[in-house]
Image: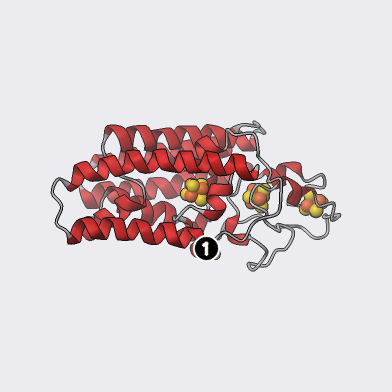
């Protein structure tokens, strides 16, 4: 049972959030929503422990499709960055604001960029592409994320300042068009750089929240220096170019780790 402690802890954390929000907001949706996500993540961890090779993909599809199709398209909740600004400006602590608080702002203090490895519906599609390991060293294009972040904020601010009507409808279409754009740019960049995660590394505005918070993450991959033989395999299989054998928080690309566990699975000495 001991080896299943982590999925159980993760499930307990999500259930705590589910019950707290259900009771404080008097809305049973939160119980369903966070229980579903918690169960999906715990199932993925369980499958991983059982050495099922596609465990992460199962969680990505369960959570990513639920958020994209059910929350986004069916329930009209804009869960993208624009939705976060929108709900924040309207002073509503619901949907996207709660989602961002849990998955992308405070959650990363606990589980780092687990969102990026297991739940993001953009990466859910990008990870299907063939360039799982980057073909070339990382480019110095990370500054683009600050531009997309600023554009997102300016777009929603402009809607509020100009008192545009029917904002709910606009936010729905912003969600649809934003996702189509993300997929198009993400697939184009992956093809151009031969790197599935190029979009995550250079363009995604959400990393402006994710990177600094995940610097302090409790959950992170560490290296047992006694076992490590410096073969370098972990770095060769890492989709995010993380120097995972360096245990310090300042390790190269440390805030890029998406906890995909490819390095752990491939280490011949079980040093990670
Ligand atoms: S970096 Fe952005 S696009 Fe990539 S997985 Fe994370 S949230 Fe999704
Ligand atoms: S794959 Fe394992 S043994 Fe090789 S460098 Fe990485 S941690 Fe060390
Ligand atoms: S391969 Fe290891 S270091 Fe690289 S992103 Fe995945 S878990 Fe993190």
| Left or right of residue 177, residue 132 in this image | right
Closest to the observer, 112 or 140: 140
Give the image location of residue 106, x and y in percent. 42, 60
Give the image location of residue 195, x and y in percent. 63, 44
Residue 106 seen anywhere in this rendered image of the structure: no
Closest to the observer, 43 or 131: 131
Residue 152 seen anywhere in this rendered image of the structure: yes
Residue linked to disc 1: 143
* Residue located 61% across and 43% down the image: 192
| Left or right of residue 86, residue 222 in this image | right
* Residue located 55% across and 64% down the image: 215
* Residue located 79% across and 48% down the image: 233
Give the image location of residue 177, x and y in percent. 34, 40
Q: Quadrant of the N terminus?
A: top right
| Image: 137 above or below 131 | below
Crowding at dot 1, Cα within 10 Å, few <14 / some 14-19 / many 20+, comes out as few
| Left or right of residue 126, residue 106 in this image | left
Give the image location of residue 188, x and y in percent. 54, 40
Secondary structure beneath label 1: loop
| Image: 133 above or below 142 | above
């Amino acid at each position: 049972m001991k080896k299943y402690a982590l999925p159980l802890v993760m499930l307990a954390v999500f259930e705590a959030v589910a019950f707290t929000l259900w009771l404080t907001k008097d809305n049973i949706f939160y119980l369903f929503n966070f229980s579903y996500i918690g169960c999906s993540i715990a199932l993925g961890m369980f499958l991983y422990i059982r050495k099922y090779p596609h465990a992460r993909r199962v969680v990505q599809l369960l959570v990513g499709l639920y958020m994209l199709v059910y929350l986004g398209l069916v329930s009209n909740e804009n869960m993208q960055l624009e939705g976060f600004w929108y709900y924040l400006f309207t002073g509503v602590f619901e949907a996207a604001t709660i989602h961002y608080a849990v998955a992308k702002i405070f959650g990363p203090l606990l589980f780092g960029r687990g969102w990026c490895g297991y739940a993001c519906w953009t990466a859910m599609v990008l990870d299907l592409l063939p360039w799982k390991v980057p073909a070339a060293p990382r480019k110095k294009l990370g500054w683009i994320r600050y531009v997309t972040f600023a554009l997102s904020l300016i777009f929603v601010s402009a809607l509020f300042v100009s008192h545009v009507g029917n904002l709910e409808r606009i936010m729905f279409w912003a969600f649809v068009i934003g996702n189509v754009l993300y997929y198009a740019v993400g697939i184009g960049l992956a093809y151009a750089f031969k790197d599935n995660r190029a979009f995550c590394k250079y363009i995604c505005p959400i990393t402006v929240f994710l990177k600094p918070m995940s610097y302090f993450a409790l959950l992170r991959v560490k290296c047992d220096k006694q076992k490590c033989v410096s073969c370098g395999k972990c770095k060769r299989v890492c989709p995010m170019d993380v120097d995972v054998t360096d245990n310090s928080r300042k390790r190269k690309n440390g805030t890029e780790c998406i906890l995909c566990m490819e390095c752990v699975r491939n280490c011949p000495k079980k040093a990670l």
